[in-house]
Amino acid sequence: MLTPMTKFETLKVERQAGGLMLVTLNRPDVRNATNTQMGRELRELFVPLKFTPGDVRCVVITGAGDKAFCAGGDLKERNGMTDETWRLQHAIFEEAFYAIIDCSVPVIAAVNGAAFGGGLEMALCCDFIYAVKGVRLALTEVRLGIMPGGCGTQNLPRAVGSRRAKELILTAQPFTAEQGYEWGLVNQLCEPTELMPAVQATVERICENAPLSVRQAKKSIDYGMQMDIHSAIVFEVQAYERMISTEDRHEGVRAFNEKRKPNFKGR
């Protein structure tokens, strides 16, 4: 059962008792394009989740309506912006996207429609992507005299390889969710009515697991991928050792031996 949270202008945020936070980009009249206010609200929502997630165990980001996940930056708002205002706005977007990447709990993008420009970059900032079959994706910034600046030139090549990423970014050519799946960008393809149930099933599996273990495993992957293999292995062991003295580690072993479902408390 999802319940509403803090009232935002551009986001709809709902919470589930099991630990899910559902974030809906809520500007369907402009295909959920990101304006300055949405950037501020995403920043406000995600920055605390790096260190103080509370009882949030998983976050899902999706778009309102059935046309778009997110069409990218709101170019009507940007029309006529001074260079300084543009820079200040982009700094807000940077902080918001970095906060999504740094979120200590898993973040899933439920791409229910087109994801262009900053919309695809936002999805790429998530840990993995489920998408509706046939939706179109693209990084089209070079057609506007700019370039991807929401981590797209870094996250896309890490997902599909540098040669494929260069082709997609430098041509600004749209591609389908099916192609994204083939290249390793999209984790799962769904029919429109199956997207959220599929995401929900994955969320439930994640939320059933020990929350500290999930967070430490995610951290180990994220930071380890930035290191040489030997340094990454050392980091992994240090992350592992932090779990040994937790209540959840003791509970997990007890539950296994008692042949029951564990009751993890995140301690």
Image (cartoon, rainbow, N blue to C red):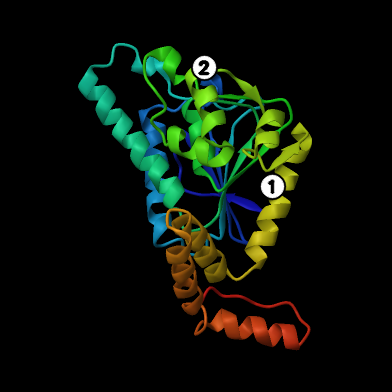
Relative to 221, does residue 243 appear above or below in the rendering? Answer: below
Residue 144 position in % (x across, y down): 41, 13
Instruction: Tell me what residue is drawn at x 37 percent, y 35 percent.
Output: 93
Instruction: Tell me what residue is drawn at x 37 percent, y 14 percent.
Output: 145
Circle 1 residue: 199
In the displayed structure image, the side of residue 137 where residue 230 appears, left or right: left
- Residue placed most toward the observer, 155 or 54: 155
Instruction: Tell me what residue is drawn at x 44 percent, y 33 percent.
Output: 153
Relative to 254, does residue 27 appear above or below in the rendering? Answer: above
Res. 159 mark: none
Tell me the quarter of the picture where residue 129 sits. top right
Q: Is disc 1 placed on a helix, strand or loop?
A: helix
Q: Residues within 10 Å of mark 2 (few under 14, many from 20)?
A: some
Image quadrant where one finds the N terminus? bottom right
Please name the amino acid that badge 1 sits on: Val
Q: Looking at this view, name the residue that lies furthest to the left.
A: 84
Residue 257 position in % (x across, y down): 74, 88
Res. 171 mark: 2
- Residue placed most toward the observer, 199 or 237: 237
Instruction: Tell me what residue is drawn at x 39 percent, y 44 percent.
Output: 98
- Count numbered badges in the picture: 2
Residue 41 position in % (x across, y down): 40, 40
Tell me the quarter of the picture where residue 208 sits. bottom right
Q: Residues within 10 Å of mark 1 (few under 14, many from 20)?
A: some
Relative to 87, does residue 126 appear above or below in the rendering? Answer: below
Residue 205 position in % (x across, y down): 70, 60
Please name the amino acid that badge 2 sits on: Thr
Whether residue 31 can be seen here? yes
In the displayed structure image, the side of residue 95 where residue 161 appears, left or right: right
N-terminal-most mark, 2 or 1: 2
Q: Is disc 2 placed on a helix, strand or loop?
A: helix
